[in-house]
Amino acid sequence: MSHENIHEDTVQLAHGSGGSMSRDLVSQVFLRAFGNASLNRLDDHALVEAGSNRLAFSTDSYVVDPLFFSGGDIGDLAVNGTVNDLCTGGGRPICLSAGFIVEEGLPIADLKRVASSMSKAAKRAGVPIVTGDTKVVDRGKGDKLFINTSGIAVVEHNFEIHGGNLQPGDKVLISGTIADHGISILALREGLSFETSVQSDTAALNGLVADILEAGGGSVHAMRDPTRGGVGAVLNELAESSGAAIALREECLPIAPPVRGACEILGLDPLYIANEGKMIVSVAADRAEAVLRAMRSHELGDQAAEIGEVTADCPGLVSLLTALGTRRIVDMPVGLQLPRIC
Amino acid sequence: MSHENIHEDTVQLAHGSGGSMSRDLVSQVFLRAFGNASLNRLDDHALVEAGSNRLAFSTDSYVVDPLFFSGGDIGDLAVNGTVNDLCTGGGRPICLSAGFIVEEGLPIADLKRVASSMSKAAKRAGVPIVTGDTKVVDRGKGDKLFINTSGIAVVEHNFEIHGGNLQPGDKVLISGTIADHGISILALREGLSFETSVQSDTAALNGLVADILEAGGGSVHAMRDPTRGGVGAVLNELAESSGAAIALREECLPIAPPVRGACEILGLDPLYIANEGKMIVSVAADRAEAVLRAMRSHELGDQAAEIGEVTADCPGLVSLLTALGTRRIVDMPVGLQLPRIC
């Protein structure tokens, strides 16, 4: 994978896709400027020593368009997304911040509706919003509403759970169906309707992650929520960071029938479509069954499945054994299928 | 001060000014939705218990226009501003996050220049940027670059230092000249030039605050950096939160001559112009001299001055004894003098 493909001298939409162009921009601009051990890991959160505690710290800005969609809105997305990023190291999220950038002219009713969603999502996750900030930009200099949420989790275990920790022999699990969020946004944006409506899967997974850890303990090697770039991009990142290969089995990928149908009609690969309430888990084989059981016992994991395994050959390679019995490479996407999906 | 003056049903630029319209929006939309003890204090940071530690947690989005100005740019503003918010409770900032919302078409050279400023500012403050996020929005849906920084500080003292803690008899100090940042932005935006150029005062004050605490200990009752809305808005907030009055002396306000000149020409009151590297301190009278000495010994406080005192009459009122010997009320500003100043 090339890290030198910033062809253009200006920022492109594809730089925000979560694919290799995003990575290149981050490496060449931000890592080069800020580089430190914590940031260089490129996990969805940083681990920080604060006095006698180990904390996870994470930030995410949300620019989803439209603001309101089937199954959620920018508000619960912003709460759930950051809670999930905080979880991926196994920490217990304790608080969130919320920073609003509002375009002049946004109906206050819309802002109230978003605030109400955030409040409900925060209560459901059990993670309060404790501090905030509001800025207003002139009409035409923003797009209705952007939200940044940042958060803190307390990391109480001593396990190594991070994106560079995949181990050969691990089973790769996912907590449910893939591509729901991206397809729900796309359907709305393009005015498509399907027989069965597709809803965003936006949800906070801190409860599910606590159950996963209780079942798997230190056998849980890595977790990651496959948002921008989808399962395909995230597994490529994990494989690359860990110097391991991942072999997926197509027939095991849980995909809801209307999402599968939409992807076929639109010519989209569900492996690259964003999820907002799913967790990928890499766990030692001997605990995989127990973890899968724990996931399925949780209301947000009842469709959980084992979708592949980690192998030692071809470091960095993600492949898919198709339903036809052939094996194809699941590349890191370069640009994007869908801009402003989160 | 009315809290019911959201006359309009859409968000106005003035809602982002830091004046009473900002406060009303926050109360009516966000506090109503999220309300919890920590947020309700409306300090520039939240105090959070994390395991055995007390943390300060803060967030701020930066939308300053233009991105680059005399004395700084959006990058060092974003680092210094959040470091300063974290400091206002006397905590020791330990890390920052950085979330970028980039408009398609921004020259990558500009992004690199901003990242380099942030890196330098973070090193100068001794507070690393440990986690980040980048989103890209389509051309015309943003304005070059918005940055959110959030941060964590460890609070190691047991003093009560917060905006609601002003005590009658306290002396009110400020760490240096006022209105530099706002005037530097305004001059650039309006193409004004003055005989002596006015530079933004953007600076991280965590070192200065450590010296203030060492000199004043628990006699330091409140600190606040007077950014949007300036000294006038911030003192009104402190007076209102504390149920105390503040009496300022005009002749004691440190104002650099070119800033004073610019304000006179433009008809602006320097009390309402933003600062980005100043701290207001309310300290018990018997430690005021020691704290002032400590401030003046620090390179970022050599112009520090005692500008007034806290009294028990007229709770919530801020007044100014003018150079002519009359006393005028320093109101909470309603809207804004200068949009997108930070």
Image (tube, coloured by chain):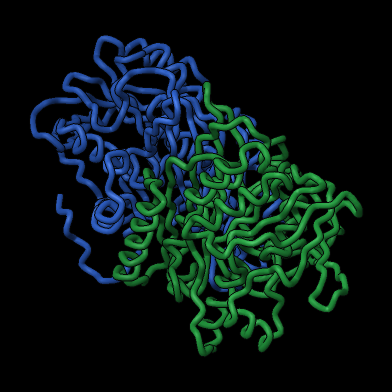
Chain colours: A green, B blue
Q: Quadrant of residue B340?
A: bottom left
Residue at 41% in and 24% down: B90
Q: Position of residue A163 (x, y in %)?
A: 71, 46
Q: In this image, B339 relative to A211: left or right?
A: left
Q: Position of residue B251 (x, y in %)?
A: 27, 28
> Is B161 placed above or below A127 here?
above
Residue A30 vs residue A284, the one in the foreground: A284
> Is B106 placed above or below B125 here?
below
Residue at 57% in and 69% down: A341
Quadrant placement of the C terminus of chain A: bottom right
Say whether residue B261 is visible: yes
Residue B189 vs residue B342, the one in the foreground: B342
Q: In this image, B4 relative to B259: left or right?
A: left
Q: Position of residue B28 (x, y in %)?
A: 24, 57
> Is A340 placed above or below B288 here?
below
Q: Quadrant of residue B247?
A: top left
Residue at 37% in and 64% down: A114
Residue A167 vs residue A224, the one in the foreground: A167
Say whether residue B73 is visible: no
Residue A323 vs residue A202, the one in the foreground: A323
Count of numbered tags: 0
